[in-house]
Image (tube, rainbow, N blue to C red):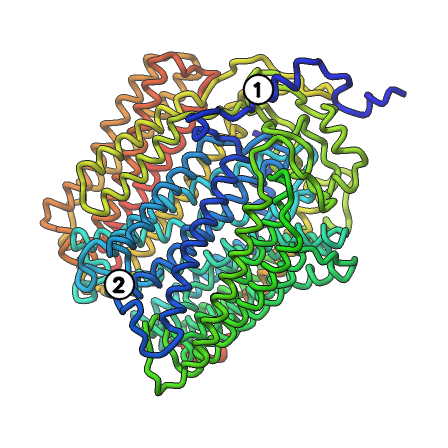
Amino acid sequence: MDQNQDYPNSLPRPDYELPLLKKIWRPPSGLSFITVVNNEYIGIFYVGTAFLFFLLAGVLALLMRTQLAVPENNLLGQDLYNQIFTMHGTIMMFLFAIPAVEALGVLILPNIQAARDLPFPRLSAYAFWAYFAGGLAFFCSLFFDLAPKGGWFMYPPLTSYGFSPGDNSDFWLLGIGFIEITAIAAAIEIVVGVLLNRAPGMSLDKMPIYCWAMLVFAGMIMVAFPAVILCTALLELERSFEWPFFVAEKGGDPLLWQHLFWFFGHPDVYIIFLPAAGIVSMIIPTMVRKHLVGYRLVVLALVGTGFLSFALWVHHMFAVGLPQISMSYFSAASMAVSVPSGIQVFAWIATIAAGRLKLTVPALFTLGFLFIFVLGGLTGVMVAVVPFDWQVHDTYFVVAHLHYVLFGGMVFPLFAVFYYWAPYASTRPLSERLGRWVCGLMFIGFNTAFFPMHVTGLLGMPRRVYTYSTEVGWDTLNLISTLGAFLIGAGVLVFLVDLIRNFRPFRSEKAGNVWDAGTLEWLPGGDYAMRSIPIVESREPLWDQPNLAEDVEAGRYYLPGAPTGARETIVTSPIDARPLYILQMPAGSWFPVLAAFGTAAFFLLLTVKLVVPALFFGVFAVAMIIRWVWETDPGPSHPPVDIGGGIKLPVYVTGSMSHSRWAMVVLMIVSASLFACLIFSYYFLWTVAPGFWPKGGESLPEVAYPLATASLSAFSSAAIAYASRALKSNRFWTVRLALLLAVPLLVGALVAELWGQWQIGLRPTDSGYAAIVYTVISIQGFFVTVVVIMGLYTFARSVCGLINRERRATFDNTMLFWHYTVVQGLIALAVVHLSPRFLG
Amino acid sequence: MAAALHFVTNTLRMLSGVLIWGAHFGVVYIFTALACARRFQDLSWLGIDIVSWTVAIATVMAIAGILVILLPAWRNLYHRSPQPATPAFIDWMTVAFGGLALLAIVLEALPVMLVPIC
C-alpha cells in the first residue's frame, strides 16, 4: 500500500510551496521590523520587556533591603522609600507578573496547538507596544519625584485628593490604564486562540494542560480586571472632580475601594499562579518521561481554582470590621480553594514518583517552586483563619507569605520556563552549569530573605516602615533578609550572563527538542510555525505518534502551503477540534504600533493634566485603530481551499463560528463584568449610607425622562435589527439609513437621562449617591460613544461597498454590541430610577 | 451554528456545579451583609434567625440543583450509549465540578451554625 494514503497530503510537495510559505510569513526588515506581528517575535519582545521590569523592580527591592539592613538608616528617607515600595509592588504585579504570563501565552500557545499564529496578531502587537511605551514612561516617574506612594493597592482616603495632592497617585491610576487594555486584549486573544485555533483532533481532553491554564487565566482576566478598571476610574474621578465615592461624610465609603480592588486583587494571585502551574504540569512529565498523573483532576483543579478564587477577596479585609459570619464565609472559601491546589501538588508528586526525574535546571527550579509554594500555601491557610490574621495583619508575616506564594508560585516556574523553552526560541539552549548556580543562589537567597520575615512579622514589625529603632530587636533578622535579597540578585546576575552568552533568538535554526518533550511546540518549523498542521491523537503527540515531526516537516499533514497566497491558519471547533474554516490573518502594519503609542501618550498626558494634547493622542489612537481594522474583514475573497485529506474549507465565515464574533462575545463578558461591579457599587453605597438616597421617589427626575430614554434606546436597537434584515436582501441604502437613524436615537436616549438628573439639581459632587448615578450615566455614555463610532464605521464600510449579505462580519459585530449596549442601558435605567422608589 | 451551540450547552452543563456554587455564595454573602447593615438579623422563626434560615434554604436548593445535573452525568459515565450525546470528558468534568462545588457549599454554609451573625 502507498504510504501516502495514511496522510492528508501526499509527497513530494510542489517546489514552490515551501518558499512561498516562508516568504509570506517572513517578518519585515529594516525600520519596519518593529511592525512585526508574528507571535514568536512579539512573544520574545513581550517576555523580554516583562523581564526588564522584573530587573527594575528587583533593583528597587535591593534598595529597600539596603535601607532596612540596619536600624535607623537614612539612606533613602521616608518619602523616597514610600515611592520605591509602591513602585516595587506595582511594577512586579502589573508590569512584570501579569504581562509575563500573557507574553508566554503569545509566544508559545499557537505552536503548542499547532496553529500558525494567534487569531488576532495585530491585537497582540498593539497590546505589546502600548505596554512597552506606557510601562517605561510610568517607571520614569520615579526620577521626577512623581511616582505614586500609596502602596500597590492604593487605599483611599490616603490616596485621595485630601491626603495625596499632586500627580503621584494619578500616575498609578492612569498609568496602569494601558496595562488594563493589554490584559483585556490578551484575554480576547487567548480565549479565541485556545478555543478555535487548535490542531485538528486536539479535543478538549487532549489539550495540553498549559492551554487549559491559559484558558482559565484569560477567563479570570475577563471577570476580575473590570473591577480594577472601575475602581481606578472612581478614584480618579474623586481626585480630579471631587466626586465623593470614598468620602464617608458625603455618603461614600473607603471600603468600596477595598471590595473592588480585592475582587480583582485576590483572583490576580491565581491569574499569575495558574499559568505557572500549567507550565509546571508541562515540565514535570517531560523531565520524568511519563504522562501527567491525574490529567482530568488537574483540569478540575485549574478551573475549580479559577472559580473559587473569586470568593476570597474579603480575606484581605478581615481587619475592617465586617460581620463575623461574612468573614467566616470567606475563611471557609479560603480553606476550600486549598483542595484544588492540593490536587495539583499531589498530581505533580505522583508524576515524579511514577518515573525517574532528570535533575535538569528546569526540574530543579520546579522542585524549588514546589517547596516554596507549598510553604506559602500553608501560611495562606494560616492567614485565612480570622483570629490569626488579626494578629499578623499588615506585618512582615504577610510580606513573607505573599512572596512565598508569588515568588515561589510564579518566579521559580518562570525561570524553569526560561531554561525549558529557550531551545524553542534560540539556536542554543541556556547553560546547565550556569543554570544550577542561578537556581541554587535564588533558592538559598529567597529562603534566607523571606523565611526570617515570618518571625520579624510575629515580632510585630509592620509593613512599609522605612526604618525602625534599635530597641525593638528586629535588626539581626532584617540584616539576614537583606543578605538573602542580595543572594537572589546574584542569582539573577548569573542568569543575565547566561542569557548574554547563549540566548540567540530570531534565527531560522533552533536548538529544538533537547528535552525529548512530547508536545507540539517542539515541532520543527520557521516563521510560519510548522510546515503542515498535524492531526493530534494524544496529549503528547511527539511521544505517541511515530515520525510525527518528520511528517509535519515534509508537508504530509493539513495546509502544507499557503493556498490563499496570504497568512492563514485553520479554525477548528471548540470541543472536538474539527476543521471548520481557514482564517485569513493580517500581516504586520504600522497602524497598531502607532495606535499603541497614541494610547500610551493619551494616558500619560492625562496624568499630568495636559488634557488637550491627551485628547489629540486619544483621537489619533482611535483613528489608527480604525485604519488597522479596515483591512481585517476581507470577505469571501477566495474559493474554498483544499487543506488535504479531501477536506475543503471556506476562507471566510460569518455568524456564530466567526472568530471575530467570539472576540466580541469575550468583550461583552468583560463589559458585563464591569457593569456588574458598577451596580454592586451603587447598592453598596446604598447599604452603607441610605440617608443620602432619595426617599420614596422624591428628588428623582419625572417618569417621563426614563421613559423617553428607554423608548429611544429600544427604537435605536430596532433600527439596527431592521438594518440587519435589509442587509439579507442587499438593500444597501436601507441599511445605511437605518444605521444613521440609530445613532441620534441612542445619543438622544443618553442625553435625556443626563438632562433628567441635571435639571432636578443633582450634581455629582453632592454625595456618594449623586456621584454613582453620574458614573452610571458616564459609563453608559462611554459605551454609547463606542457603538456610535462602530455604527459610523459600519456605515462608512457600507458606503465603500465593503458590506453585503455575504460579507457582514463587521455589521454583525456592530449589531451585537449595539444590542448589548441598549440592554445594559435599560438595566441601568431600572436600577437608577426604580431602586430609590422601592428601596428608599 | 451547531458547533457554537454544542459548545455553549456543554460548557454550561460542565460548569453548572461551580456556577451554582457562585450563585449560592453571592446569595448568602449579600443577604448577610444586608441583614447586618439594615439590622434585621434578629428576625426569627421557630427560634432560628433569618440569616440561618436563608443560608439553610439556599444551601438545600444549591445542593438539589447540583444533584439534578450531576446524577445524569454520573449515569452517562457508567452506562455509555454507542453514540453518546456528550463526550465522556464533559460528563466526567460535570460530575467533578459538581463534587467540588458540593464540598465548597457545605464548607461555606457550616459557619452559620458556629459563628454569631453580625
Residue A226 percent location from the top left of the image = 38, 49
Picture quadrant of residue A644: top right
Which residue is painted at 14% across and 54% down in the image? A765
Residue A652 is situated, as x and y percent measured from the top left of the image, at 53, 20
The answer for how far apart the CA atoms under marks 2 and 1 are is: 55 Å
Locate the N terminus of chain A by quadrant.
top right
Circle 2: element type: loop
As shown in the figure, which amino acid type bears the numbered disc 1? Lys
Badge 2 is on which residue?
Answer: A156
Q: Secondary structure at mark 1?
A: helix
Residue shown at the point (73%, 58%) measured from the top left:
A351
Query: Could one spot residue B52 in this view of the protein?
Result: no
**Residue type indicated by callout 2:** Pro
Q: Residues within 10 Å of mark 1 (few under 14, many from 20)?
A: few
Residue position marked by numbered label 1 in the rendering: A23
Tell me, yes or no, whether the two marked residues, 2 and 1, touch with CB atoms within 8 Å.
Answer: no
Numbered disc in front, either 2 or 1: 1
Residue A5 or A760: which is nearer the viewer? A5
- Number of numbered markers: 2
Above or below A603: residue A560: above
Quadrant housing residue A753? top left
Residue A604: quarter of image: top left
